[in-house]
Image: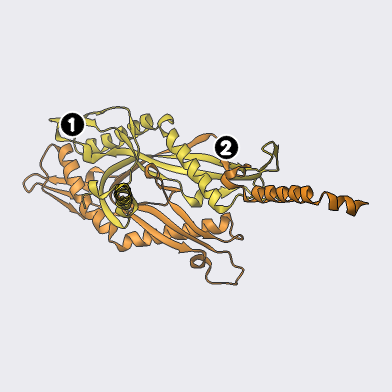
Chain colours: A orange, B yellow
Amino acid sequence: MIPLWLLKHAKPLLMAGLVAVALMVLWWWNPLHLFGGKSKLQQTALLVSSVQSVGQLVTAQYYGEVIVTYEDVAGSGSFRQPEVALIARGWVKAGFDVSRLEAGQLRYQPETRTLYLYGLKPLVLDADINPWFIPQRGVPGFDIIHASRNAGFDEVKAVKMCAHQRLTEQALATDLLVHADLNGREVLKGFLGLLLGAPVERVVMD
Amino acid sequence: MQSTTKLKYLGLLLLLVACRPHQQALVVGRVQAAAQLATTEFTIDKLVYGTESKHIAWVVKLKEARFLAHSQAHIKTGIDIAQLQPGDVEVAGERISIMLPPVRVVNFSYPAEAMQLNRQASHLRTLFSRITVEEQEELFREAERDIRHSLQYLGLVKATQQQTRALLSALLHNLGYTEVYIRFKNDSLLLDEVLTPQNETI
């Protein structure tokens, strides 16, 4: 009785089955997030948790790009080891800490138009790789090229921190501190010259 | 005849697309000069809360995947001293009057090491939804955009003006001035920009 009925309605049943399968495939595929499934940031508040006074003179900055994989962090392990590869773009800024510049550290000799600065050394002030590198142009700080299914938040974070270290090393290898020192003298020559109301032709740092 | 014209237009279009400059290549791998004085550092806390859920027939919502992380941004503000012109400084004996350029963001830092996943509240994978690491990155990008858009409204300008006055007043007193007057050209906040070779000096 039932097989006869099935045979009689085989064509419409087959069509209904095909439509159901097509809908299921479409649902799993979810093109253009037709059925939702797109991650959405919920509104949360911002909290200014601290305000600190600093005194930093940025005189040179390096913009760089590095490629880092999870192998660089954990070494080559078993075949089940998580895989992450990303391109990271960021900057390293160098200059001087002038927050504690005191009267004794600064001396101007009008005869030779020379400014003497004591105890100022160039140092790395900031090294950053943010989620956005150039937000106004849509260039991300991190491009995740590949991440295996077993790679999660912690693995990606470890790779990002390794990228941060690599970028700093890369910047220092391009003599960032030497540039910061040279340009710092020019900047201080102009800036302190204006404040002194006297011409400064040379800056000597010791 | 018509097909020749079409080909010409197609060629012109291809030429326009192909000749678009690669902007990223312009900015990386070089040291550039700067002259910015950072006087204040703000720490901003933000919860990054993202959800993802699928629907059946656009109506029935299935169990959603959740991502919750604590993050912190560090923003340094100050002034661009390269903008200070001789006309902005007046010196008369032991009295100095300075007109400083507007406050600007000297450095924006949204570091990965300060991003902490809340494991209790996060549910990254359900039967039908999954928040991938790529999507987590996208959530952090949106969060950074949120912070950047809110900078104008967080009272950064007044606090920075106050700190800059304090730092420069101490320096100017050390230089021998007894009367110090510091003003700012305006109360706007300039955001940080990645320098391109057009405005670099090294």
Q: Which of the 4 image quarters holds residue A195?
A: top left
Q: Callout 2: few (<14), some (14-19), or many (20+) C-alpha neighbours within 10 Å?
A: few
Q: Position of residue A94 (x, y in %)?
A: 31, 52
In the picture as drawn, the residue positioned furthest to the right comes out as A1
State if disc 1 and disc 2 touch (CB < 8 Å): no
Q: Position of residue A46 (x, y in %)?
A: 51, 35
Label 1: state its secondary structure: helix
Which residue is rendered at x = 6% and y = 46% of the image?
Answer: A111
Which residue is rendered at x = 50% and y = 65% of the image?
Answer: A73
Distance between mark 2 and mark 1 Cα atoms: 46 Å
Q: Amino acid at mark 2?
A: Gln
Q: Chain of mark 2?
A: A
Which residue is rendered at x = 53% and y = 57% of the image?
Answer: A156
Residue picked out by circle 1: B88
Label 2: state its secondary structure: loop
Q: Amino acid at mark 1?
A: Asp
Classify the position of the C terminus of chain A by image quarter: bottom left
Q: Position of residue B50 (x, y in %)?
A: 59, 42
Up the image or down, A153 lies above or below B39; here it is: below
Image depth: mark 2 or mark 1 in front: 2
**Camera-side residue: A42 or B104?**
A42
Residue picked out by circle 2: A42
Q: Position of residue A205 (x, y in %)?
A: 20, 53
